[in-house]
Image: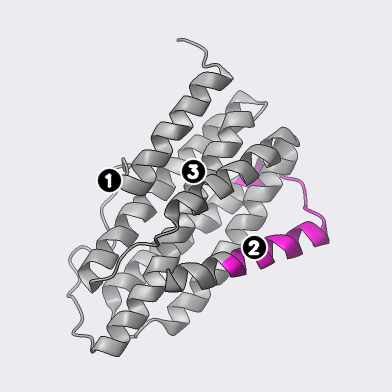
Amino acid sequence: MRNLSQIDRLLGAIDQSLRTVYAAPPTTGRPNPASGLQEAELDDARRRLAGRLLRVDHAGEVSAQGLYQGQAATAKNAEVREQMQRSADEENDHLAWCEARLQALGEHKSYLNPFWYWGSFGIGALAGLAGDRWSLGFVDETEQQVVRHIDEHLQKLPMDDQRSRAVLVQMREDETHHAYKARTAGAAKLPAPVRGMMRIVSKVMTTTAERL
Protein backbone atom coordinates (compact mmCIF):
# COMPACT_ATOMS: atom_id res chain seq x y z
CA MET A 1 0.00 0.00 0.00
CA ARG A 2 1.34 3.42 -0.98
CA ASN A 3 2.29 5.74 1.86
CA LEU A 4 0.59 9.11 1.45
CA SER A 5 2.71 12.25 1.56
CA GLN A 6 1.62 15.52 3.16
CA ILE A 7 0.81 16.82 -0.34
CA ASP A 8 -1.38 13.75 -0.95
CA ARG A 9 -3.23 14.40 2.29
CA LEU A 10 -3.68 18.09 1.45
CA LEU A 11 -5.14 17.23 -1.95
CA GLY A 12 -7.39 14.70 -0.25
CA ALA A 13 -8.52 17.38 2.19
CA ILE A 14 -9.36 19.74 -0.68
CA ASP A 15 -11.38 16.99 -2.35
CA GLN A 16 -13.10 16.21 0.95
CA SER A 17 -13.93 19.89 1.50
CA LEU A 18 -15.65 20.09 -1.90
CA ARG A 19 -17.62 16.92 -1.18
CA THR A 20 -18.57 18.17 2.28
CA VAL A 21 -19.73 21.63 1.23
CA TYR A 22 -21.07 21.13 -2.29
CA ALA A 23 -21.89 17.45 -2.82
CA ALA A 24 -23.56 14.54 -1.08
CA PRO A 25 -21.13 13.25 1.57
CA PRO A 26 -20.07 9.56 1.34
CA THR A 27 -21.79 7.84 4.25
CA THR A 28 -21.10 4.60 6.11
CA GLY A 29 -24.42 3.15 5.00
CA ARG A 30 -26.09 3.39 8.39
CA PRO A 31 -29.86 3.96 8.14
CA ASN A 32 -31.19 7.45 8.75
CA PRO A 33 -32.63 7.50 12.33
CA ALA A 34 -35.59 9.49 11.01
CA SER A 35 -36.62 6.74 8.61
CA GLY A 36 -40.02 5.24 9.40
CA LEU A 37 -41.10 8.17 11.58
CA GLN A 38 -44.02 10.34 10.53
CA GLU A 39 -43.34 13.90 9.43
CA ALA A 40 -44.83 16.35 11.93
CA GLU A 41 -47.32 18.99 10.82
CA LEU A 42 -45.53 22.11 12.04
CA ASP A 43 -46.77 25.66 11.76
CA ASP A 44 -44.43 28.20 10.15
CA ALA A 45 -42.90 29.39 13.42
CA ARG A 46 -42.05 25.90 14.69
CA ARG A 47 -40.83 24.80 11.25
CA ARG A 48 -38.49 27.79 11.08
CA LEU A 49 -37.27 27.07 14.62
CA ALA A 50 -36.50 23.44 13.78
CA GLY A 51 -34.82 24.55 10.55
CA ARG A 52 -32.57 27.06 12.30
CA LEU A 53 -31.53 24.46 14.86
CA LEU A 54 -30.78 21.85 12.21
CA ARG A 55 -28.82 24.41 10.15
CA VAL A 56 -26.59 25.01 13.16
CA ASP A 57 -26.18 21.26 13.66
CA HIS A 58 -25.33 20.81 9.99
CA ALA A 59 -22.75 23.62 10.15
CA GLY A 60 -21.29 21.93 13.22
CA GLU A 61 -20.87 18.71 11.27
CA VAL A 62 -19.16 20.61 8.44
CA SER A 63 -16.79 22.02 11.07
CA ALA A 64 -16.26 18.53 12.49
CA GLN A 65 -15.24 17.27 9.06
CA GLY A 66 -12.68 20.05 8.73
CA LEU A 67 -11.40 19.44 12.25
CA TYR A 68 -10.94 15.70 11.81
CA GLN A 69 -9.40 16.03 8.36
CA GLY A 70 -6.97 18.67 9.62
CA GLN A 71 -5.97 16.50 12.56
CA ALA A 72 -5.59 13.42 10.36
CA ALA A 73 -3.33 15.40 8.01
CA THR A 74 -0.84 16.24 10.78
CA ALA A 75 -1.21 13.28 13.17
CA LYS A 76 2.10 11.66 14.05
CA ASN A 77 0.76 8.19 14.82
CA ALA A 78 -0.88 6.08 12.10
CA GLU A 79 -3.42 4.62 14.54
CA VAL A 80 -4.47 8.10 15.66
CA ARG A 81 -4.78 9.15 12.02
CA GLU A 82 -7.01 6.14 11.28
CA GLN A 83 -9.15 6.88 14.35
CA MET A 84 -9.66 10.46 13.15
CA GLN A 85 -10.69 9.19 9.73
CA ARG A 86 -13.17 6.67 11.16
CA SER A 87 -14.75 9.42 13.26
CA ALA A 88 -14.90 11.67 10.19
CA ASP A 89 -16.73 8.91 8.30
CA GLU A 90 -19.38 8.76 11.03
CA GLU A 91 -19.66 12.55 11.00
CA ASN A 92 -20.51 12.24 7.28
CA ASP A 93 -23.60 10.28 8.32
CA HIS A 94 -24.59 13.21 10.51
CA LEU A 95 -24.07 15.59 7.60
CA ALA A 96 -26.37 13.57 5.37
CA TRP A 97 -29.06 13.21 8.04
CA CYS A 98 -29.04 16.93 8.90
CA GLU A 99 -29.16 17.90 5.24
CA ALA A 100 -32.15 15.61 4.66
CA ARG A 101 -33.94 17.28 7.57
CA LEU A 102 -33.13 20.75 6.26
CA GLN A 103 -34.61 19.83 2.88
CA ALA A 104 -37.74 18.39 4.51
CA LEU A 105 -38.14 21.56 6.59
CA GLY A 106 -37.61 23.80 3.57
CA GLU A 107 -34.50 25.45 5.00
CA HIS A 108 -31.07 26.16 3.50
CA LYS A 109 -27.62 25.13 4.69
CA SER A 110 -25.33 27.76 6.17
CA TYR A 111 -23.92 30.04 3.48
CA LEU A 112 -20.66 30.13 5.43
CA ASN A 113 -19.98 26.38 5.25
CA PRO A 114 -16.70 26.80 3.30
CA PHE A 115 -15.47 29.10 6.07
CA TRP A 116 -16.58 26.67 8.80
CA TYR A 117 -14.75 23.82 7.05
CA TRP A 118 -11.43 25.51 6.40
CA GLY A 119 -11.35 27.40 9.70
CA SER A 120 -11.81 24.10 11.51
CA PHE A 121 -9.29 22.37 9.24
CA GLY A 122 -6.66 24.92 10.25
CA ILE A 123 -7.45 24.48 13.94
CA GLY A 124 -7.33 20.70 13.58
CA ALA A 125 -4.00 20.83 11.74
CA LEU A 126 -2.49 22.99 14.48
CA ALA A 127 -3.81 20.61 17.14
CA GLY A 128 -2.23 17.71 15.28
CA LEU A 129 1.11 19.51 15.06
CA ALA A 130 1.04 20.04 18.82
CA GLY A 131 1.16 16.26 19.28
CA ASP A 132 -1.26 13.37 19.23
CA ARG A 133 -2.15 13.56 22.94
CA TRP A 134 -3.12 17.22 22.61
CA SER A 135 -4.94 16.54 19.35
CA LEU A 136 -6.96 13.79 21.04
CA GLY A 137 -7.61 16.14 23.95
CA PHE A 138 -8.99 18.64 21.49
CA VAL A 139 -11.34 15.98 20.13
CA ASP A 140 -12.47 15.03 23.62
CA GLU A 141 -13.25 18.62 24.61
CA THR A 142 -14.88 19.43 21.26
CA GLU A 143 -17.18 16.42 21.41
CA GLN A 144 -18.16 17.16 25.02
CA GLN A 145 -19.13 20.68 23.98
CA VAL A 146 -21.06 19.31 21.01
CA VAL A 147 -23.01 16.96 23.30
CA ARG A 148 -24.00 19.89 25.53
CA HIS A 149 -24.99 21.85 22.43
CA ILE A 150 -27.18 18.97 21.17
CA ASP A 151 -28.81 18.69 24.60
CA GLU A 152 -29.79 22.37 24.32
CA HIS A 153 -31.27 21.79 20.87
CA LEU A 154 -33.25 18.78 22.05
CA GLN A 155 -34.85 21.02 24.66
CA LYS A 156 -35.68 23.75 22.13
CA LEU A 157 -36.87 21.47 19.31
CA PRO A 158 -40.66 21.24 18.81
CA MET A 159 -41.82 18.19 20.76
CA ASP A 160 -43.73 16.68 17.85
CA ASP A 161 -40.80 16.91 15.40
CA GLN A 162 -39.79 13.33 16.12
CA ARG A 163 -37.77 12.95 12.91
CA SER A 164 -35.37 15.78 13.82
CA ARG A 165 -35.27 14.56 17.41
CA ALA A 166 -34.28 11.02 16.33
CA VAL A 167 -31.40 12.41 14.27
CA LEU A 168 -30.08 14.51 17.15
CA VAL A 169 -30.34 11.64 19.64
CA GLN A 170 -28.22 9.38 17.41
CA MET A 171 -25.74 12.18 16.80
CA ARG A 172 -25.43 12.68 20.55
CA GLU A 173 -24.67 8.98 21.03
CA ASP A 174 -21.99 9.06 18.33
CA GLU A 175 -20.35 12.24 19.66
CA THR A 176 -20.25 10.77 23.17
CA HIS A 177 -18.52 7.69 21.75
CA HIS A 178 -15.98 9.81 19.84
CA ALA A 179 -15.07 11.62 23.07
CA TYR A 180 -14.72 8.29 24.89
CA LYS A 181 -12.44 6.90 22.15
CA ALA A 182 -10.24 9.98 22.34
CA ARG A 183 -9.87 9.63 26.12
CA THR A 184 -9.08 5.92 25.97
CA ALA A 185 -6.48 6.62 23.24
CA GLY A 186 -4.57 8.90 25.63
CA ALA A 187 -6.12 12.35 25.27
CA ALA A 188 -4.51 15.11 27.33
CA LYS A 189 -6.68 17.44 29.41
CA LEU A 190 -6.69 20.85 27.74
CA PRO A 191 -5.86 23.90 29.89
CA ALA A 192 -8.89 25.88 31.11
CA PRO A 193 -8.09 28.98 28.97
CA VAL A 194 -8.05 26.82 25.83
CA ARG A 195 -11.38 25.22 26.74
CA GLY A 196 -12.85 28.66 27.38
CA MET A 197 -11.63 29.98 24.02
CA MET A 198 -13.15 26.93 22.30
CA ARG A 199 -16.51 27.73 23.89
CA ILE A 200 -16.31 31.32 22.65
CA VAL A 201 -15.48 30.22 19.09
CA SER A 202 -18.31 27.68 19.21
CA LYS A 203 -20.76 30.36 20.36
CA VAL A 204 -19.77 32.65 17.49
CA MET A 205 -20.20 29.82 14.98
CA THR A 206 -23.59 28.66 16.26
CA THR A 207 -25.01 32.18 16.52
CA THR A 208 -23.87 33.09 13.00
CA ALA A 209 -24.91 29.79 11.39
CA GLU A 210 -28.40 30.10 12.84
CA ARG A 211 -28.90 33.28 10.81
CA LEU A 212 -26.70 32.59 7.78
Circle on res. 201: 2
State left or right for residue 129 relative to residue 161: right
Q: Quadrant of residue 75?
A: top right
Q: Residue at x 27, y 66 (%)?
A: 101
Task: Mark 1 or mark 3: name the one nearer the start of the chain.
Answer: 1
Q: Amino acid at mark 1?
A: Ala
Residue shown at the point (57%, 48%) measured from the top left: 120
Residue at (54%, 20%) from the top-left corner? 7
Quadrant of the image for the C terminus?
A: bottom left
Q: Is residue 184 magenta?
A: yes
Q: Is residue 19 magenta?
A: no
Instruction: Identify the residue under disc 3.
Output: 87
Task: Work out whether residue 186 or residue 68 is closer to the camera in this orientation and state it.
Answer: 68
Residue 207, above or below 190: below
Task: Report the coloring of the rendering.
Answer: one colour
* Amino acid at circle 3: Ser
Q: CA distance from mark 1 to mark 2?
A: 27 Å
At label 2, counting other C-alpha atoms closer than 10 Å, the crowd grade (few under 14, some 14-19, many 20 or more) is few
The quarter in which the N terminus is drawn is: top left
Indicate the position of residue 27 as horizontal and vertical percent values: 31, 43
Stretch of the chain drawn in magenta? 182-204
User: For the residues marked 1 and 3, what is the alpha-carbon distance in whole angstroms?
Assistant: 18 Å
**For mark 1, what is the residue?**
24
User: What separation in Å lies between label 2 and label 3 (alpha carbons)?
Assistant: 22 Å
Q: Which label sits on residue 122?
A: none
Compared with residue 5, is residue 146 higher up or lower down, i.e. above or below? below
**N-term mark: 1 or 2:** 1
Of badges 1 and 3, the one in the foreground is 1
Q: Amino acid at mark 2?
A: Val
